[in-house]
Amino acid sequence: MKKQTKRAAIEGVFGQFLSGMEAGDISPIAKLLSDNVKISFSNIGDLEGKQEAIKGLSNPIFPKSVVKHFISNNYTATEGNIGKQSAYLTGFVVDTLEEDNQEAWFGGYFTNSYELTDEGWEIVDLRFELDWLIGSNPGIQHWKEPRRTIGWSPNMTLPKIISELDSPWRVFPKSDEFGSDEEQILDAYTQYAWATDHDIGLMKDLFTEQLEANLVPVGRIDNKRELMTVISTFRSGRVSSHHAIGDYEIEVIGDVANMKIFRRTPVHVTKDTINRNFFSATYDCSLRKIDGKWKFEKFFYTEGNVFERGNA
């Protein structure tokens, strides 16, 4: 039997945590947390210690509502018995599945820390930054709003996540585990998305020098420097941006690969749509493995009409 990787085990723990939150059942979450766990959520505040965490995490549960989470952009780096993870959460909460329901969609970033104990991997630190929120629902009225302005001001609420201290690529630049080619290719996009949204410096080794790209609404881009300059300029003046993966296809042929990324789009949630996936943008990418690292050599982004793909 193949041994489970540390990454898979850690991401399994996180999946259990989110499943408990989604279902409104806190009881299974307690065993996942260390006794001295620290939780910093921009929408609900700071919690320290297992008992306070369980009490505080009970607040955002919606037992009388329908809640659904979509986790994406999952990346975990490890060093010995320590793990660092980033992930993006998209979700919705509705009071009913009727047409005239009260509905809210939201999204945000996690960076989490884990430690391996005799009982398995435990969560020692959870950080979440609510990135966007649309709509309204009574279950989230107590949430603090996402940041709306850039720059510093007196009495402002500081972000819960800073890439230089919290992202797995900064904490463990060389993870002691390497996944399959497909995992490494998907990780390349995940790193690109994080770099675009938080930390442009993490992008410099992701592209070949002769990169060919075309991004809506920018147009044609002919090399890595131009792409990074465009993205850095695009990112300035924005409070936040998010590039969450909705679905993907990867084809590996030796040292070259093709990848298609689909970006999820929120739709009105009803009995008819709750188990359907809707998207409105795609990335079509070609990558090449150079000195053991997958790099993008073609990178095309298009957006437009909403389309459906598979089941949620």
Image: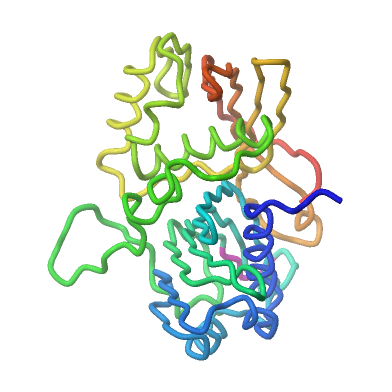
Question: Which residue reaches farthest left?
Answer: 154
Question: Which residue reaches farthest right?
Answer: 1
* Color encoding of the figure: rainbow
Give the residue drawn at x 64%, y 43%.
246
Give the residue drawn at x 54%, y 33%.
188
Q: Is residue 10 above or below residue 51?
A: above
Residue 181 image point, x, y percent: 67, 30
Residue 64 makes an appearance in the image: no
Which residues are the magenta region? Answer: 100-104
Give the residue drawn at x 26%, y 69%.
157
Residue 180 image point, x, y percent: 69, 34
Residue 243 makes an appearance in the image: yes
Q: Is residue 257 above or below residue 27?
A: above
Q: Along the horizontal axis of the image, is 197 left or right of 257?
A: left
Q: Is residue 154 above or below residue 109?
A: below
Q: Nearer the viewer, residue 246 or 291?
A: 291
